[in-house]
Image: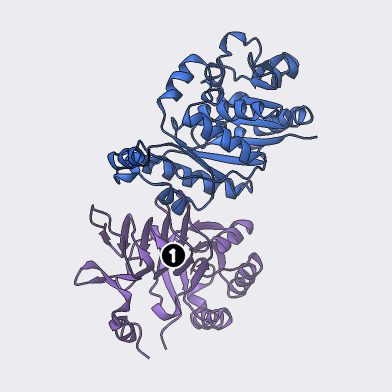
Chain colours: A purple, B blue
C-alpha cells in the first residue's frame, strides 16, 4: 500500500499532499500521521495540496477543523480543480489553482493511470473554445481548428479532431490521443510535439497517436495490436 | 406586429457584412417589408455609403441613444424604396459610446413600426460585436470560402451559442464556382461540414458588387446580376419562402457550349 498522504516541512510551514482514494480514508490517514508526531507539528500552519479532487467549502471547512484539533492551522489550498479552488477562496484561504497543463512534471503528483479521473464532454469545440482537465478527456463531438483539448491523461475524440490536442500534459508519455478522424493542427503528448504533414491528408479510419521510441507515432486503430498493447500499457498497471 | 431583429456578423473583416446588410435590406423592402438597417460599426461607418445615403445624414445612432434627437429624426428613408430606412453609425465616436442594453432598448423602440431590423455588426468579437448581437433574434454569419474567414466564423458560431442566440445561419459570400471545380477554393460542402449550421444562401463572386457598392446602388436592385438574385433569394428565405438552394453554375466550359450548340 503506497502512502496516500505526504507531509513535508518547508520554511513556509507544513505541506500536506492528499493522494487519491476515498476522502474519508485519506483524511483518517492524515490524522494518524499528524497525531503520531503531534508534538513536532503543534502550532504550525498547513498548506494542503489537493490535486484534482473536487471539494466543497463544507468539506474543506471540515478538514480545517480536523487540523485545528491537531494543533495546526490550515492557511492555504493548492488544487487543480476549479470547484476546490472556488471553495478555498470562499473560506478566505490562500488559494492557488494550477491548470494541469502549466504544472511542471517535477511537481505533478504521480496518480496511477488507471485511477486517474476522467470527464466526458458532449459537444463540438469550436475555434477559441478549450477543455482543460487534469485527468482523461473523452469528447463526443468534433474539435474544430483553433480549438484545444489539454488533458493530464488520454484524449479520446469521438468525432473529428482538427484542433490542437495535448495528452499527458503533466509530462506523461504513456498518454494516447485517439480520434475517429485524427487530423489535428498539432498534437502533443507529454513533452513531444508533432504536426501533420503539410499536404493535408484525410484519414480513412480511426487512429491512435502515441509516443514510441521518443517520437509521436500515428497508427490506424484497426490493427488489432492496440488491444494487446493496452493490456501491458503503463508501468503503474501492476496489480 | 413586431419586427424580427437580425444581426449580420462574421468575425473577420472584409467578407461582406455591410454589402449583405445593404442588399438584404433592399431585397426585403422590394418584397414590401418595412425594414430598418442599423449600422453598428460606430467610428467606421460604411452602410450609408453602400446604400448611397451618405449625404443625407443629420443625426446618427449615438445621437438617438444619447437623446440629442428623437429616434425618428435619425432614421433616413431610402431614396428609392419607401419601406427602407437607415440608422447610420456615428463616425466621430467609438464602440464604447453605446452599451448592449442601450441597443436592446433602441431595437425595442423600433420593433412596433417595422417587419425587419437588420444590424450590420463591426468585425471582431469585442464591444462592437457585443452591442450588435445583444438585441438579435437571429444571427446571420457571413463567410467567404477562405480558411481564415471560416475559422473566424466558427469562433462566432461558438460565441452565438454561448449567448443562447443560436443557432446562427450561414451565408457563403464570394464563391467562385470555377475555382471550386478546379479544387482551388473551399467548396460549399467543405464550409458547411465544418461549421455545421443552416445554410441560408450562397452569393457568387461578382464584379457587379464592386460597381454597385461604389455607386451606392445595392446590386439586389439590379434584375440581372447573379449576386443580386442570390440576395433576393436569401431575403425570400428569411420571409419563410421555400426557395431551394441551387448549386452555382460556373462560366460554361467548352463542352457545355458545344452541347448547347448541338442541341441548338
Single out the residue that lies furthest toward the left. A213
Q: Please tell me which residue lies in front, A107 or B136.
A: B136
Percent from the top left, x then y, of residue A150? 41, 61
Residues B141 and B42: in front is: B141
- Give the crowd class for mark 1: few <14, some 14-19, many >=20 residues within 10 Å: some
| Rendering quarter of residue B209 | top left
Q: Is residue B35 visible?
A: yes
Instruction: Give A150 or B140, whichever is nearer the viewer.
Output: B140
Place residue B13 in its image quadrant. top left
Q: Where is residue A215 in the image (x, y as percent from the top left)?
A: 21, 66
Image quarter of residue B29 = top right
Whether residue A182 sits left or right of residue B213 in the image: it is left
**As drawn, A101 above or below A110:** above
Vertical position of residue A156 compared to residue B106: above or below: below
Name the residue located 29 percent from the left edge and 42 percent from the top edge.
Answer: B255
Q: SS of the residue at dot 1? A: strand
Say which quadrant the N terminus of chain A sits in.
bottom left
The residue drawn where x is 59% and y is 68% is: A55
Q: Looking at the figure, which quarter contains the C terminus of chain A? A: bottom left
Relative to B138, is A123 on the left or the right? left
The residue labelled by disc 1 is A159
Q: Which chain hosts label 1?
A: A
- What residue lies at 62% left-to-right and 37% top-to-bottom? B236
- Residue B175 locus on image (x, y percent): 41, 38
Q: Please give left or right for residue A104 compared with residue A196 in the image.
A: right
Figure disc tally = 1
Does residue B45 appear in the picture of this structure?
Answer: no
Amino acid at each position: 500500500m503506497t502512502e496516500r498522504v505526504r507531509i513535508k516541512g518547508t520554511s513556509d510551514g507544513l505541506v500536506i499532499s492528499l493522494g487519491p482514494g476515498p476522502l474519508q480514508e485519506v483524511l483518517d490517514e492524515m490524522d494518524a500521521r499528524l497525531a503520531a508526531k503531534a508534538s513536532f507539528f503543534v502550532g504550525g500552519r498547513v498548506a494542503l495540496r489537493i490535486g484534482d479532487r473536487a471539494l466543497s467549502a463544507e468539506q474543506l471547512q471540515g478538514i480545517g477543523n480536523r487540523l485545528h484539533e491537531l494543533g495546526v492551522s490550515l492557511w492555504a489550498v493548492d488544487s487543480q480543480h476549479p470547484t476546490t479552488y472556488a471553495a478555498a477562496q470562499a473560506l478566505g484561504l490562500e488559494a492557488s489553482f494550477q491548470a494541469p497543463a502549466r504544472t511542471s512534471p517535477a511537481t505533478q503528483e504521480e496518480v496511477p493511470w488507471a485511477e486517474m479521473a476522467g470527464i466526458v464532454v458532449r459537444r463540438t469545440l469550436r475555434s477559441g473554445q478549450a477543455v482543460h482537465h487534469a485527468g482523461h478527456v473523452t469528447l463526443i463531438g468534433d474539435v474544430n481548428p483553433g480549438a484545444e483539448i489539454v488533458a493530464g491523461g488520454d484524449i479520446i475524440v469521438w468525432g473529428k479532431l482538427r484542433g490542437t490536442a495535448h495528452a499527458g500534459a503533466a509530462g506523461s508519455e504513456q498518454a494516447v490521443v485517439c480520434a475517429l478522424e485524427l487530423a489535428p493542427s498539432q498534437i502533443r503528448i507529454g513533452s513531444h510535439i508533432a504536426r501533420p504533414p503539410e499536404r493535408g491528408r484525410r484519414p480513412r479510419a480511426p487512429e491512435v497517436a502515441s509516443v514510441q521510441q521518443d517520437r509521436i507515432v500515428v497508427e490506424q486503430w484497426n490493427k488489432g495490436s492496440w488491444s494487446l498493447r493496452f493490456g501491458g500499457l503503463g508501468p503503474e498497471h501492476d496489480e | 406586429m413586431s419586427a424580427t431583429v437580425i444581426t449580420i456578423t462574421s468575425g473577420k473583416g472584409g467578407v461582406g457584412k455591410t454589402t449583405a446588410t445593404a442588399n438584404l435590406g433592399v431585397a426585403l423592402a422590394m418584397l414590401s417589408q418595412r425594414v430598418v438597417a442599423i449600422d453598428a460599426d460606430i467610428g467606421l461607418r460604411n452602410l450609408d455609403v453602400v446604400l448611397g445615403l451618405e449625404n443625407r445624414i443629420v443625426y446618427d445612432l449615438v445621437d438617438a441613444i444619447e437623446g440629442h434627437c428623437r429616434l425618428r429624426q435619425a432614421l433616413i428613408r431610402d431614396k428609392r424604396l419607401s419601406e427602407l430606412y437607415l440608422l447610420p453609425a456615428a463616425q466621430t465616436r467609438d464602440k464604447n459610446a453605446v452599451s448592449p442594453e442601450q441597443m436592446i432598448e433602441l431595437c425595442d423602440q423600433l420593433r412596433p413600426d417595422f417587419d425587419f431590423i437588420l444590424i450590420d455588426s463591426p468585425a471582431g468579437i469585442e464591444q462592437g460585436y457585443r452591442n450588435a448581437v445583444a438585441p438579435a433574434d437571429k444571427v446571420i454569419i457571413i463567410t467567404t470560402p477562405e480558411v481564415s474567414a471560416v475559422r473566424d466564423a466558427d469562433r462566432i458560431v461558438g460565441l452565438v451559442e454561448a449567448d443562447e442566440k443560436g443557432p446562427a445561419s450561414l451565408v457563403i459570400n464570394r464563391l467562385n464556382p470555377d475555382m471550386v471545380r478546379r479544387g482551388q477554393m473551399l467548396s460549399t460542402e467543405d464550409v458547411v461540414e465544418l461549421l455545421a449550421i443552416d445554410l441560408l444562401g450562397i452569393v457568387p463572386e461578382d464584379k457587379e458588387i464592386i460597381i454597385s457598392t461604389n455607386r451606392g446602388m445595392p446590386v439586389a436592385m439590379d434584375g440581372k446580376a447573379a449576386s443580386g438574385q442570390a440576395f433576393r433569394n436569401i431575403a425570400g428565405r428569411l420571409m419563410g419562402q421555400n426557395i431551394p438552394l441551387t448549386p452555382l453554375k460556373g462560366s460554361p466550359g467548352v463542352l457545355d457550349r458545344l452541347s448547347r450548340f448541338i442541341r441548338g
